[in-house]
Image: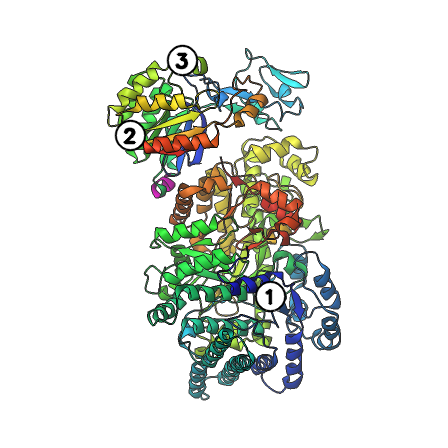
Amino acid sequence: MPRGMSKRTQHLREESIKTEPHISIERAQLLTQAYKKYAGTVETPILRALAFKHILKHKKLCILDGELIVGEKGQGPQSAPTYPELCCHTLEDMDVMDSRERIYFKVSDEVRKIQKEEIIPYWENRSVRKRIFDYVTPEWQTCYENGIFTEFMEQRSPGHTVADEKIYHTGFLDFIDQIDAEIEQLDFFNDRDALKKKAQLKAMRITCEAIIILGQRYEQLAKDMASQEKDPVRQQELLSIAENCRVVPAHKPQTYWQAIQMYWFVHIGVNNELNNWDAYSPGRLDQHLNPFYQRDVQNGVLTRDHARELLECLWIKFNNQPAPPKVGITLKESGTYTDFANLNTGGVTRDGHDGVNDVSYLILETMDEMKLLQPSSNVQISKKTPQAFLKKACAVSRKGWGQPAFYNTDAIIQEQLQAGKDLIDARGGGASGCIETGCFGKEAFILTGYFNLPKIFELTLNNGYDDRSGKQLGLKLGYGPDFTTYESLFDAFKKQVQYFVDIKIQGNNIIEQIYAETMPSPFMSVITDDCIKSGKDYNAGGARYNTSYIQGVGIGTITDSLAAIKYNVFDHQRFSMKELMEAIDNNFENHELIHHLVKNKTPKYGNDDDYADTIMRSVFDLYHASISNRPNMKGGFYRINMLPTTCHVYFGSVMKASANGRLSGKPLPDGISPAKGADRNGPTAVIKSASKMDHLNTGGTLLNQKFTPSVVAGETGLDNMASLVRSYFAMDGHHIQFNVIDKKVLLEAQANPQDFNDLIVRVAGYSDHFNNLDKALQDEIIERTEQQF
Amino acid sequence: MDNGMIFNIQKFSVHDGPGIRTTVFFKGCSMTCHWCHNPESISFNKEVTYDVEKCQSCGFCIGVCPSKALSLDDEVISRDDKLCIACETCTEYCIQLAREIAGEEKSTADLLKAIESDQAFYNESGGGVTFSGGEALCQIEALVALAKACKKRGIHVTIDTCGHVPYEHFERILPYTDLFLYDIKILDREEHKTYTGVYNDLILDNLNKLLKTEAVVWLRLPLIKGVNANDTFIDQLETWLKGKNIGQIHLLPYHTIAVDKYRRLRRHYKGQHFEKPDESWLNQVLEKLTQAGYKTLIGG
């Protein structure tokens, strides 16, 4: 039975999931034409804006049969444009993309030819990626190559920005008025940056014109198609689409349907300007749409069913857009088609009331019916959220594919206040991407890279020397047996962490400046407060808040490794550090007893055991102190969060065995989840352990819990799920998500992938098709501790 | 002495009373039911269990045993029970996790700490603590001390009992108990003796008395095909229950998971011929008891 409430959405959904992801070269070609024409003749922001306008003016339009919401990032479903100004793919890259088994993108001969003849010759020495590798230090490069940390901006631009409500009451003609007013007020007598600001504002103005042109082109196309259409029903729909595109994006939307179309045009604009991480997201969609919904229903121009069908159309639109193609380490850290547009449903309103409304329930129903990877959907649960809404979300979640995830509104607000934001702004914020906290519409909150804490501990035991690469990566502070107390060992670890954090932050600051100088994003600046007011670009600190995140990975492994040494070597002298290191170097082969003791007979994180949890907290505090509140290049600050996407698998693959018994090359645990098999006292103990972390001092943490279906069955099961969520959130937990699938089913799916094309599982802050995950990640999910009894 | 001999502490227990609970299993039982799913919970003593299937006969335990109680006997580790002092050395060093300790003496303070640590979940879900076993009421001193302390902290207390203890024990625990889960197995007294080792007079008598107090009692019926999963038992029960104030009835269908456990622990299982009840019959019972006015459900 195909999913979708109507034949229309069933058909569109099928097309979305059946179409093979493929590379579209159109954007790259148009961009290159524009750069060739304008580069050197105008300021950089204006160059970027003119290129954007050229793309939107000439890109192929697409209205599929039956569609009600129009616009594609590429030329149609699953069509992925490239961004050679950031990362100019080699022909070899293209061949790999085309032929790799998972997360592939088909590359036609024609595309390959254009890449070779037009794109590579122009961009290979001009791309941001090339510039980054030219400027960062040799230490940075060595760390990057050997899995100490990753770098988000080497193939994708700074993103993590989410829409707020402004586009629902401000059309782009209104934005132009705002921009003109700012230009008018520029002070060329006193402001040294006035000229720079003028160029930036002019660039913003051009992007407004560009998006209006795209709307007009769609209006015309819909009209043309209507005149050819024989079916009177479809003809009327096309005329409605034309009318919608006449109104938005030039003017503010008048109806629920137009409001959705308005968002979608903005989404297409953002994603054609640059390929920023986390696509873009409507954020608090239920709150934005509800006024339109109520008014339209009252006026008799909208039914609940039609409102839901339009949401289904929007869902399919999201799913049509695969994440920009990635290669190399960036693919390893984020190996998925999901582009992390993450909706926040529920929460509170700006004035602090419960935010759940009629559209919130419509969204839950749409999510449930569509069962698509994109958009990622979560619910924000506050103390004020009605139990009925929480339980309805649990009922969808227990179907087993990981959506919606649950976020703690009250924690998200406090995290933001902690970061110095205004309360009203904070209430309008939420989680984006996987779990990252941000202030929607007013903040550039940029993930900059994952940070491999357990690997740094591995180096700490080895005088900073990396056996795997044969390189001296860290400081020379001694070998394991040189540390005669736990405290001296921890102190060495601390120094190594600080050393690598410095390397990472220095690199980040270089990269931030490269983007600020060479890759302004004037369109994104129009829709992000206060870029227009400050005349500054989104990539140069124009947003009201500017946060750079570094994401810690493997807290379970590092905690248990430290606990294993403290407990066995120092407290109980069961064996010496030398013996332990010998066992580690041999991957515990012929060292079964030591392996047994560290694996089975040592306190571990995830069991509400203060011995291990105190160590977890000390590592967390060290990481926090090393990073948080350090200034970035945009006038904002660094913060931490604890999440991995798929990086925990990659980080594990560059490591030998760990002191906690983890074998060489095996994945690290995801987010703040305990190490595989370490948690033996059930979910409440995991939650208790996790809550000992200072969540409010982060920009988000990720906790995954796997349940067998029997645990959450029936009305009682729903009550229990809801209680777990509420309890964790009462302890300030940031996020929790559930995988409710029998291990048996996963093993079967691994053996017979062809029979499980529709199996979706929660990975880490997002869901993915099980078949799209590589074997190591599949194994990791299968082995996550299943909570049952 | 207020210490309890505890067999297991199960957190996130959701089938032993309302909400999310912690179930404390007391070791030692006054009955020896043939179908017992936790054979290692019957004895009141701490013991070392040995899983013959996990054991790789590496012999490491033989070397570390301080009382020389272990020996290798045809690829299986044998233990001289007279020598074993249950010191846990062999369990600590068993690489295959084949040897495990069953039973640990715990003080009221330690148990209370374990129970209290999940209080946030009880509050949110309307859960609490369940004292089960073995038979928790057999260790009445430890139980009363603990239940009293829980009550004082506002924690909901449930006692899961087989009923085969002196009524005085019920009287003593009653002030600190919010709910009793009371097992009824067989109503025919001779049959009861055959399958559980004791007559059911005391059990039924205690239940009668308990039902005359303020106590909230839910009945739990383990239903085993070949023993009591038949209409006769249900009819007898209905007759017996007439006019009595029962909160809920839980039907607990027998399952065969224990068979494997007995084999691995090299214990004789007297229930080889037991089967799980037919689902259709189970649903009939559910309907019948519901119609008779009892809130009935399958499972705990």
Nearer the observer, A679 or A517: A679
Residue A482 is situated, as x and y percent measured from the top left of the image, at 63, 41
Q: Quadrant of residue A304?
A: bottom left
Nearer the observer, A148 or A781: A781
- Give the crowd class for mark 2: few <14, some 14-19, many >=20 residues within 10 Å: some
Residue A484 is situated, as x and y percent measured from the top left of the image, at 59, 38
Q: Which mark is residue A264?
A: none
Nearer the observer, B216 or A267: B216
Q: Quadrant of the N terminus of chain A?
A: bottom right
Give, as a three-letter code, the residue at label 1.
Met
Q: Chain of mark 1?
A: A
Marks 3 and 1, how far apart at CA? 74 Å
Residue A462 can be seen in this image: no
Residue A212 can be seen in this image: yes
- Taking the magenta stretch, the answer to whether it contains residue B120 is yes
Give, as a three-letter code, the residue at label 2.
Val
CB within 8 Å, label 1 to label 2: no
Q: Quadrant of residue B98?
A: top right
Marks 1 and 2, how far apart at CA? 63 Å
Q: Chain of mark 3?
A: B
Give, as a three-letter code, the residue at label 3.
Val
Magenta segment, prevailing SS (helix, strand or loop): helix
Q: Which residue is mark 2?
A: B216
Q: Which mark is residue A153?
A: 1
Q: Which residues are magenta?
A: B119-124
Q: Quadrant of residue B108?
A: top left
- In the rendered image, the residue lying farthest to the left is B213
